[in-house]
Amino acid sequence: MTHMPGASEFSGARTIARADLGVPLGMVLQIAGSSSQVIIDAARQKTLSLDTDNCIAMAGQVGSQVKMRIGHSWLVASIRSMALDREDMSSIIADVDFLGEGEEEPLTGRIHKFRRGVTRYPAPSAEIHPVSSQDMREIYAADNRPHVQIGTVYPTRDTRAALYVDSMLGKHFALLGSTGTGKSTSAALILHRICDLSPQGHIVMIDPHGEYGAAFSKNGAIYDVNNLALPYWLMNLDEHCEVFVTSEGADRTVDRDILAKCLLAARSKNRLAESIGRLTVDSPIPYLLSDLTTTLQNEMGRLEKGTGSLPYMRLKTKIDEIKADPRYSFMFSGMLVADSMHAFLAKIFRLPSDGKPISIIDVSAMPSDITATVVSVLSRLVFDYAIWARNEPQRPILLVCEEAHRYIPSSTTGSGQAVRKILERIAKEGRKYGISLGLITQRPSDLAEGVLSQCGTIISMRLNNDRDQAFVKAAMPEGARGFLDSIPALRNREAIICGEGVAIPIRVSLDNLEEERRPASGDPSFTELWREAGGEHDILERTITRWRNQGR
């Protein structure tokens, strides 16, 4: 760091004691918009490090807060980086980011009525002071907006961290963190707190590992391959193509056109279609798979000589194969032909919630080649419902997507593009229609470009990968940069939160969640489990039975 003029002149003479504040920690050196430089008296910092108040003891360290007076206001800044002044070894030069300002309480001189943003900047040479635990309580005190408390603000012992639910859900949120940092438990904690606050809520969670069923067994509805009963006819043309069309390149375009024509013919055979003036291939009208294959067969019979029947055979073979495969029966069963759309949407969207505001969709046992399509159908149903219910009393829906990088990949080619398109659309347009998107991922750098920047609140746990860290830094607002440098150094169950859901960026030590409310995501203890023996024959018997029956 380059030496600033006048830095070496900072000495005891400048640290004139004030009756209300004591000896200052240092002074402002340079002002430059959101980021500025201060100079800290190393001896004063050492003295403060012995203070019984945790916040004052932390003063002047990276990640700590300092305050400076401007008129009758206090300006609060966070220390981002520090370097020793090479010309005066008793001084430290630090970069700071301004967080916000509050009024000065006349009698005590403390901060109150704190708010984000800066209206007046300090002049160079303005004194800086440590922020006390009492100040921290005022800075992070929750206002009258609906909020949930999720942990304790670092480095305080008792200042509670509040998440403003409406602001967080209104602009989407992302929860990021490497494997093993407590990401699943943190997600469960936040969702439990929201469910406790709003027991008539409507939350749909995509659970790719079957972890969250255990966490929400009492206040959630759990759906998996055994009870989901997702009707295949709810798919639109893009989703039908992902399942039934196996060809690539030019052949895929031909197969898609044939499927669209035959699908429209199969839908039009339903009596419901007669009452609909504008039936399209995407209309959620029930049809029989046998009608679809019969239409394909008839179309193939009408072909002129010389026209290839291969596209028709490809489609018919694939449809017959899926109909006969028991792994797909949760979606392609002959029992799912009736018009069950009302009942299906009611149970998935929790309309009404009946005290269970969250539905967990466990996709872990589904065949991997159809999982993306299932997520696409569920996400699109959320979006379409919100669009067509615009003139009704509003029922906002939160869609939470665990392992989001699987469904919104940065790649724009390959399979799974239908789910990528709908989730990107929800990220961009969802809030207009009362849809909130919650993304949970361990690889933010693998997400489609721009999706993370659509999330108004970012909750970042420890990220070990440099590329992921850089990706998150690019998506976070300017004032939070100082906090971001501590992302690799976070402990388990610690998070940096910034954006709409919090008053100002905070580092939080998250609360412990009750045992019965935790997801089943704990790592096995090899040393303990490898001491146990007995019953292996029965374990294998039961496992093979479930394996062969695909979980049934």
Image (tube, rainbow, N blue to C red):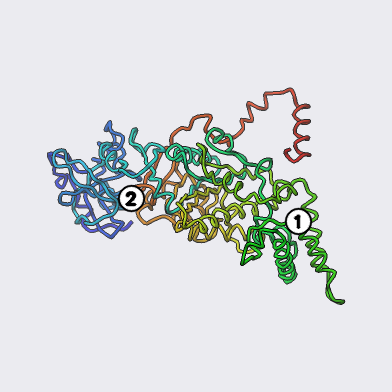
Looking at marks 1 and 2 on the same chain, the residue that comes earlier in the sequence is marked by: 2
Residue ID at (25%, 42%): 130
3D distance between C-alphas at marks 1 and 2: 70 Å
Percent coordinates x, y for residue 264 in the rendering: 70, 65
Dot 1 amino acid type:
Leu
Q: Quick check: 385 left or right of 268? A: left
Could you say which quadrant of the image residue 146 lies in? top left
Could you say which quadrant of the image residue 165 lies in? top left
Q: Quick check: 442 left or right of 84? A: right
Tell me: residue 353, above or below residue 438: above
Q: Quick check: 22 left or right of 208? A: left
Residue 120: which numbered mark, if any?
none
Dot 2 amino acid type:
Ala
Residue nearest the observer in this picture, 97 or 410: 410
Percent coordinates x, y for residue 392 in the rendering: 47, 54
Residue 95: tell me if it is visible.
no
- Quarter holding the N terminus is bottom left
Percent coordinates x, y for residue 24 in the rendering: 19, 43
What residue would you read off at disc 1? 289
Residue 150: tell me if it is visible.
yes
- Quarter holding the C terminus is top right
Residue ID at (30%, 40%): 141
Query: As drawn, which residue projects farthest toward the left?
Result: 19
Secondary element at tag 2: strand
Q: Quick check: 158 left or right of 231? A: left
Residue nearest the observer in this picture, 87 or 31: 31
Percent coordinates x, y for residue 110 in the rendering: 20, 41
What residue would you read off at disc 2? 83
Residue ID at (70%, 46%): 330
Query: As drawn, which residue projects farthest toward the right?
Result: 305
Tell me: residue 261, above or below residue 122: below
